[in-house]
Image (cartoon, rainbow, N blue to C red):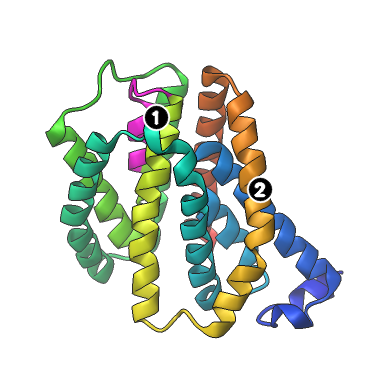
Amino acid sequence: MFDTFANAGGMPLTQMGVLPLAYLGIAILSAGVIRGYSGFGFSMIAVMSVTLLLPPSEVVPIILMLEVVASLWLLPRVWRQIDWKSLVWLSAGVLIGTPAGVYLLANIPPRPMRAAIAVVVMVLVVLLWRGFALKQMPGRGKTVAVGALSGVLNGSATIGGPPVILFYFSSPAGVAVSRASLIAFFFGTDIVAFLMCLQQGLVTTKTATMGASFLVPMILGLSLGSRFFRQSKAEAFRRKVLILLMLLALAALVRALWG
């Protein structure tokens, strides 16, 4: 069994055995459930799972394609709940912070930065779990600052999501608005990242075909996750999101230290 998985790396899907294909399908399905439920988490879960069998140069454009499709599938269902005002100022901050992040990437080793970010996220998750919450939505300046921090972290360590996730789930916006706004936010960032992959020639006929082959398990996962969200109570949803964020931070820390 282990030899089957080990020998599958880099193979076209049509040449893989049943076990590797089943593994990839379950990995994408599971990531889709998380994305449909929480509004985030698909990329990290899918990349960590799929790179066990496929090279990262192929996986990243595939996952970005799937992320864009996932957002397009989810957006019509949450459009009226999106907090556009905060999204505009967050996006402005991202544009400001990303160049600084790219500069740091060129001058500071990324592994220590990723580890530090993961630890900070875990501390903030603990604070939120213990009841920390904002009494009102942050104003323009603070919202732009959060977006700028996200841009810096995305440009320097490709971990720009946590500041925005924590921003929404510590705010009084409500879980439905927070989830909807995150779906819209990540749609924008995924489009930009995908266009950059296109520019670098990373999107090929092979990656497009492989991405298309993952659409069915992903959409099934999105449907299940969305159904679980509709059946969840607000406080239970918030707790599960914090647990997910903690697990993702732990995974990022392990990857930074031993990856």
Mark seen at residue 221: 2
Which kind of residue does numbered mark 1 sit on?
A: Val
Residue picked out by circle 1: 177
Looking at the rendered image, the quarter that the N terminus falls into is: bottom right
Q: Earlier in the sequence, mark 2 or mark 1?
A: 1
Check disc 1 and report its element: helix, strand or loop.
helix
Res. 2 in view: yes
Residue 75 in the image: x percent, y percent? 45, 45
Which kind of residue does numbered mark 2 sit on?
A: Gly
Q: Are marks 2 and 1 in contact (CB under 8 Å)?
A: no
Q: Residue at x 46, y 59 (%)?
A: 68
Q: CA distance from mark 2 to mark 1?
A: 21 Å
Tell which of 255 and 204 is nearer to you. Answer: 204
Q: Quadrant of residue 179?
A: top left
Q: Residue at x 75, y 75 (%)?
A: 6
Q: Does residue 198 sit above or below 148 in this rendering?
A: below
Residue range (magenta): 163-174
Residue 201 in the image: x percent, y percent? 41, 84
Q: Is residue 137 left or right of residue 228?
A: left
Q: Is residue 93 left or right of residue 54?
A: left
Q: Does residue 210 sit above or below 161 in this rendering?
A: below
Q: Is residue 121 left or right of residue 56?
A: left
Residue 65 in the image: x percent, y percent? 49, 65
- Hey, which residue is sitting farthest left in the picture? 141
